[in-house]
Amino acid sequence: MFMRPTAALAALFFVSTAPLALAAEKPTDPQIAHIAYTAGAIDVEAAKLAIKKSKDKEVVDFAKDMERDHEAVNKQALDLVKKLKVTPEDNDTSKALAKAAKEERAKLAKLKGAAFDKAYIDNEVAYHKQVDSALETLLIPSASNAELKSLLETGLKIFQGHEQHAEHVAGMLK
Amino acid sequence: MRPLLLAPALALALGSSPAFAATIEVTIDKLVFSPTNIQAKVGDTIEWTNKDILAHTATVKGGWDVMIPATSKGKVTLKAAGAVEYFCRFHPNMKGHVEVAP
């Protein structure tokens, strides 16, 4: 119960600051590739934590779906950048995402049982919403390579699907 | 002469009617079922070919639940008449519609 306002505040902070960092400058393809890969890797890390910690079958199944999908998409992303001879380039947005995710993981690591399940799933909903919006408003419009753009568009559909899936699981936890 | 010749042909056609049960092909590409809307008959089979690198399902709430692994196939034989909406459990934004005639 103590965690809830803090988590909510952190989520708000996360959601409100990241788009600012994103909006600062139009990212290049190597930066977009790095941001997209980082966003996927973050969700895989969160999933691994949930698989380890949760005792709820719905939550564990959801986490396994996230791990499987995002690993598959990131593998495809790596294959594409190799093919396009693009070297993903670290940038402020990737750094902000990684920093916020590290804080979120530290917070989740301290929780147990139902409190963990709820915090993990709520964050999954918020996180996927945030990435959807970044993909829609910035990453997809900024991508110049057609194949990268197409991968991001598929990525958006996947993230939107995951968001709905997370909302469904959140509804079941109540 | 004619009616005599036709009779066995007709009997054969009627007798073999289960062979007309069709397989309806649906492709999944980039999280889209296509065609999205299909019409079928009881006894028909729907076969999904998944071109995505992601696993999907074709699931009817309270009905069938077909696993369709990445770059693979899945199928279901329709047993009941009626219109059903189906979706992917992993990506609920993926939706399809089947009208099953008796």
Image (tube, coloured by chain):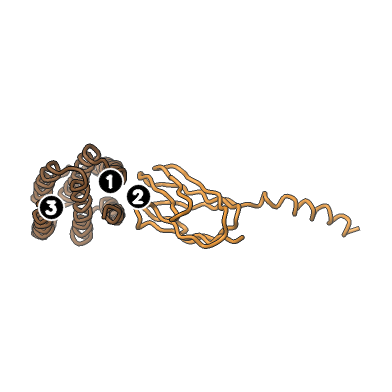
* Sequence-first disc among 1 and 3: 3
Q: Which residue is mark 1?
A: A59
Q: Residue flagged by tag 3: what amino acid is it? A: Met
- Identity of the residue drawn at 19% across and 52% down: A123
Q: Tell which of B24 and A27 is nearer to you.
A: B24
- Identity of the residue drawn at 75% across and 51% down: B15
Disc 2 chain ID: B
- Identity of the residue drawn at 66% across and 52% down: B20
Q: CA distance from mark 3 to mark 2?
A: 30 Å
Q: CA distance from mark 1 to mark 3?
A: 20 Å
- Tell me, for residue A1, which label it has, or none: 3
Q: CA distance from mark 1 to mark 2?
A: 13 Å
Label 2 sits on a secondary structure element that is loop
- The image quadrant of residue A78 is top left
Residue B98, percent from left and from top = 50, 59
* Badge 3 and badge 2 both on one subunit: no
- The image quadrant of residue A46 is top left
Q: Which residue is mark 2?
A: B90
Q: Residue flagged by tag 2: what amino acid is it? A: Phe
Chain coloured brown: A
Evaluate whether residue A80 shows in this view.
Answer: no
Residue A163, percent from left and from top = 27, 55
Chain coloured orange: B
Q: Is residue B26 above or below residue A49?
A: below
